[in-house]
Amino acid sequence: MTILLALIPIMPLLGFLILACCGSRMSKQMIAFTGAVSVGISVLITLITGLAFLVTPPAGNVVVVNLWQWFSTGGLALSIVFRLDALSLVFIFVITFIGFLIHVYSIDFMAGDEGYARFFAYMNLFVGSMLILVLADNLLLLYLGWEGVGLCSYLLIGFWYREPVNGYAARKAFIITRIGDTAMIIGIFLLFVHFHTLDIQLLMQQASSEWGNGSPLATWAALLLLGGALGKSAQLPLQTWLPDAMAGPSPVSALIHAATMVTAGVYLIARTHVLFELAPAIQTAVAAIGALTLLLAGFSALAQHDLKRVLAYSTISQIGYMFLALGVGAWSAGIFHFMVHAFFKALLFLAGGAVIFALNEEHDIFKMGGLRKKLPVIFWTFLIGSSSLAALPLITAGFYSKDQILWFAWSAGNGNPWLWAAGLLGAFITSMYTFRLVFLVFFGDMVTMPEHHPGRLMLIPMIILAFFSLIAGFIELPESMGHVQWFSKLLDPVLPAVNTAHGRIPESFFQLVAGTISLSGIYLAYRFYLKQPYLTSSFNESRISKFLYKGWGFDRVYDLLFVNPLVWFAVRNKNDFIDLFTSALARAAFYGNYLLSITQNGRIRWYVMAFVIGIVFMLTIFINL
Amino acid sequence: MNTIFYIAAAVALISTGLAITGRNAIHALLFLIVSLLAISIIFYILGAPFIAALEIIIYAGAVMVLFIFVIMMLNVGMERETENRWLRPRMWIVPVILSFILLIDFIIMMKGMPHHAISGRIIPPKQVGISLFSTYLLGAEIAGMLLLAGIVGAYHLGRQKKKVIHRFLQNEDDEINNTIQ
Amino acid sequence: MVTIPVEIQLLFAALLFLMGLIGLLVRRNVIFILMSIEIMFNSAGMVFVIAGSYWAQVDGQVMFIFMLTVTAAEVSVGLALILQMFHHFKTLDADKLSNLKDTN
């Protein structure tokens, strides 16, 4: 069992090594085989370990594998330790399973690209780093995985590096997540300075015993770790990189920016939940940020033209839901939504990518339409994914997970009617923009003819993901509908259960409201974008639309506040005043040369005078000595 | 004897002074010859008659005449104005100061010497000749070689070849053509 | 018998030397420069003779003969150089010979 656990992250990393070293010499089939099979083996091992974990839970519900000692210096001794408990089991299942499906999809999608081996190498490296991140037992190993996924995100966003725009997008992503990473590493320093260990379990124990509720140190630590989570998960105020990150290929967007990397922040907060419980102010901040972000991104998604950008803003919005759940203390609900979201968002990105691929790189949804008949499989899978995203009642998994979050937003101990209202409004907007997308792309009159039809390797992963988008919700049904609690029971040893203050209003009322809201969003989208599109034509041209399109002007603000002063200073410093100091030495030497060369004017009498002065000097000195 | 020494010394100093401040080269050289004659008298007083004769023959007779020949060959003319322009009074200040300092150094050094009466014994030329060709034979041979080198060098350096300039370059700037061959 | 103190004799030689030095530093005409160098040589040789007379030995005079030789050779070569200089630069100004200057 233990060595199998270690193989889970090692297999993709091995795939990366093989592809990085020999990728240029391998044939296309070999590359695809290596890339997909390495993740495939990880999936198998995950399933085996997962089954073994579920059927015969090991002692303490945890499996720990200590591989080797990393280093031991100056009071810090770290080892490479992988830890499998329920939380990381959920994550590695999602990562490897969806990762494998996306690898299979990209065998076909990236088939015409000349960087084929490079692509699979980076994807494998990404999967390996993400697995290290979630399996890590100490914060430094987690940070290693964190940095690894950041690097792979940069490499993959800028995959088509010949276009400068992609490079800018990759750079923007890297820099913004870097800001978060810096906050996180300072938080790790803080924790180390106080507890002299980076082992997560030890940290949590010592923190809960030494730091009282609301202690300033706990608040700072939690705030700094939250900063890291905000960067990676693209929440307010570090959310501006994710829409631009759509410059990468669609499988990249599906894997990194929908299912896994952006949820690393959610994982971090869930892992270090003890710290957040010790700092209620920060936890409330998490919920507030989640609520604000989901509204902000939702409204922005209403005004986008690019298919992938709608999905990007949707991702930001849904992660806002997860943050909202974590913020009110509904830990397992957040993780549940993560799992369900991973399925349908990956599906939406893959299907969207298939549409773009079919229409020969056309991204503008206003130039699409009526693809329902021509691309049937894509249509149905996209529809299923969208329904899950819009939380169509009763049949989609999204309904159950989102509904649980809304319920806990109202009823949990840290819950708040405002948070619930924000979540509800967000749900309305979600279903509206999602079905705006569906209606504009698949219904109506055809504008662009599809030229390539996606092959089987692209369609099968989409079908599998669609299947899971429907049934994954059934493992956690609310009280009024059978009260199945498999998921939260699974996570019980790891994450504390949410403390609900049972109010007067029963849960079924909330479900009714949520269902109505999502249906009404679908209806409004139908009216505005399908039946009577002229109603929204004025909206499309209005200033509000442009404002929302630009993501509420965050890019402009950041430009003004940070980028422009820096550029101004850099331009002013073109001659580099620090360099002036060092070049001053050179100029002083030149000046000395100039001065001394005056004394060498080639005149005999001048030289003789120099002799005489020297002689006088020497004689005077030697006589007087 | 002593008074002759002092008179000759005064004459030597005055004429040397006039030589170095003279404006006309020929006049300066003639003053220098006078100075050399006075110095030769001093040599004689010091008991070195051979050297006194040599001084007149070689120094005053050959070297200075060589100087005069060259000046006449160069035909530089009077050039009193140029010399006047070059020799402003303020040119003299720094060299005089430096020389003065050296003089003071010299006097200080002299104070430390033990007193000894001068002998003034005359050393005849025969003794000089014997010493020259027995003790200092090697030096004499080398001096001969030095003179040979001097002759050859002077002959070669004094030659003037007619420079042939291509007719296209005939009207070029003088500076470019003034390269030492 | 001469009873002039040797310091006075040496002082006299020194004065001649210094006058030659002044002439060397002040004059700009190369002929005068060469002339001043001659004066300096002469006074240095005189010191040798004074020393030989002081110790009543013959070596001083022999030294003076060698110095004379050197002087003669040096003068002939120097004057040949002056001839060349005059033919090329058309002037006897020592300050015009500054082609080896540092051209900064």
Image (spheres, rainbow, N blue to C red):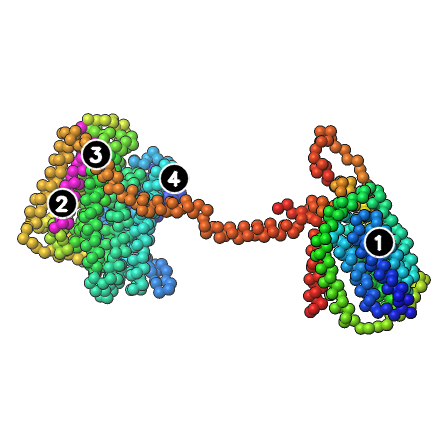
Q: Secondary structure at mark 2?
A: helix
Instruction: Report the magenta residues as a range.
Output: A417-444
Reading the image, the residue beneath label 3 is A542
Residue at which label 4 appears:
A26
Q: Identify the image quadrant of the C terminus of chain B.
A: top right
Asked which secondary structure carries label 4, the reply is: loop
Q: Same chain for the residues at labels 3 and 2, yes or no?
A: yes
Pointer 2: residues within 10 angstroms few (<14), some, or many (20+)? many
Q: Are marks 4 and 1 in contact (CB under 8 Å)?
A: no
Q: Which residue is mark 1?
A: B32
Residue A435 lies in quadrant: top left
Comparing A219 with A100, the one in front is A219
Mark 2: amino acid = Leu
Foreground mark, 2 or 1, reads: 1
CA gap, disc 4 to disc 1?
Answer: 100 Å
Tell me the distance, in whole angstroms, between the alpha carbons under discs 4 and 3. Answer: 53 Å
* Residue type, label 4: Met
- What's the amino acid at mark 3? Ser
